[in-house]
């Protein structure tokens, strides 16, 4: 993962720790804010912001301290399939066999704080967008029944502070043998909390399966891939054929990955041939959030109300000045307040 690596998951298996140098793996936790612009494959895609309480890298000696993670490990994720289900898989929104133009915009509010992240995918007349705002994150966390740690560590404003200080752009092809990447494109639910067991719902056939899960554990299905508990019993050893009927024939089967099993019982897939290309990366200054403009009718109504209030105020003041004490209390009464100590004389 590179010398001096860190992320919001606070890895402890690093041999070289930023600002500390070489360390025995498993002894130091290395944490820093993480902005996942794209985590995906041909089936599913997600964008996630992971702020931390500190906007720069921090470490903790796990051998000597009771370390806690200062970052939002779950993050503010936006995955259209997870939120809306069938019809929103990556390959249903865009042709994953062809080049895709991805534009990610970071909008600041009038105070210069990050207020919105907008990501747009474009390809030959087709496009779709994913969006992150503090309000949107709060609503999704409520729907999914998840704690909003994103807000607790500072939300988009904190994420923006870290981005402003600079981050290393990392392009990587990686696998997650422990969780089998289920958090990205398959079923990943908290069975203890929701009662929905992915192991009892292994095949994903479409809307009925998504709705059944949604009724118990909203957000459990992250993508249309059938549930396999581990890599060893699925993609590592055999050809898998997906159940979801909308998956195109050209990718409905996944052959076994020729990954070697290391002495630490972890799979090494570095020798597997992959195809992935990124080109024409451009960066421009932080943008301000677009202002929602009032319609012409709204502006006309506001103008008419303003004129009416001004006329009413002028008539009232003129009448009181003309009327004076004959109409009751004078318009200006020096005895009404005592400005020397701010107390009222009435």
Image: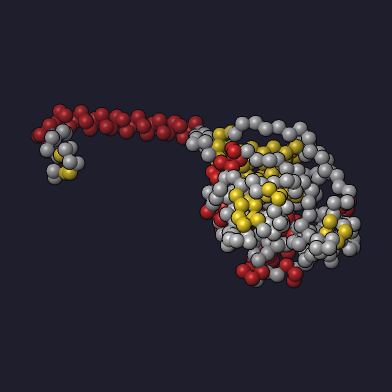
| 5 is higher (above) or lower (below) than 99 | below
Front residue of 262 and 229: 262
| 299 is higher (above) or lower (below) than 246 | above
The image quadrant of residue 108 is top right
Q: Residue at x 74, y 61 (%)?
A: 179
Front residue of 39 and 196: 39
Q: Residue at x 68, y 57 (%)?
A: 12
Q: Residue at x 75, y 37 (%)?
A: 101
Image x and y of residue 199, in percent: 75, 69
Image x and y of residue 43, in percent: 78, 52
Residue 136 shows in this picture: no
Front residue of 217 and 50: 50
Image x and y of residue 263, in percent: 83, 63
The image quadrant of residue 100 is top right
Residue 148 shows in this picture: yes
Image x and y of residue 20, in percent: 65, 48
């Amino acid at each position: 993962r590179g010398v001096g690596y860190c992320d919001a998951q606070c890895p402890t298996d690093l041999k070289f720790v930023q600002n500390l140098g070489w360390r025995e793996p498993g002894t130091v936790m290395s944490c820093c804010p993480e902005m996942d612009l794209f985590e995906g494959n041909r089936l599913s895609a997600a964008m996630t912001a992971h702020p931390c309480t500190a906007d720069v890298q921090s470490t903790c000696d796990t051998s000597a301290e009771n370390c806690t993670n200062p970052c939002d490990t779950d993050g503010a994720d936006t995955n259209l399939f997870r939120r809306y289900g069938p019809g929103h898989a990556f390959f249903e929104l865009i042709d994953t066999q062809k080049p895709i133009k991805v534009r990610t915009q970071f909008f600041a509010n009038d105070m210069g704080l990050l207020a919105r992240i907008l990501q747009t995918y474009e390809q030959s007349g087709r496009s779709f967008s994913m969006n992150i705002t503090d309000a949107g994150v709060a609503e999704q966390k409520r729907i999914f029944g998840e704690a909003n740690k994103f807000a607790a560590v500072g939300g988009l404003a904190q994420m923006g502070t870290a981005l402003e200080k600079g981050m290393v752009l990392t392009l990587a092809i990686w696998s997650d043998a422990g969780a089998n990447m289920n958090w990205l494109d398959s079923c990943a639910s908290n069975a203890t909390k929701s009662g929905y067991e992915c192991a009892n719902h292994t095949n994903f056939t479409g809307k009925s399966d998504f709705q059944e899960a949604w009724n118990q554990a909203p957000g459990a299905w992250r993508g249309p891939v059938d549930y396999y508990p581990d890599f060893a019993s699925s993609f590592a050893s055999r050809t898998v054929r997906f159940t979801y009927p909308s998956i195109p024939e050209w990718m409905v089967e996944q052959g076994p990955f020729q990954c070697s099993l290391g002495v630490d019982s972890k799979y090494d897939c570095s020798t597997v041939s992959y195809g992935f290309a990124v080109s024409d990366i451009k960066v421009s200054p932080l943008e301000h959030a677009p202002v929602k403009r009032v319609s012409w009718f709204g502006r006309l109504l506001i103008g008419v109300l303003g004129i009416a209030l001004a006329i009413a105020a002028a008539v009232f003041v003129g009448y009181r000045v003309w009327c004076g004490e004959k109409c009751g209390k004078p318009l200006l009464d020096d005895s009404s307040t005592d400005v020397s100590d701010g107390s009222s004389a009435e």
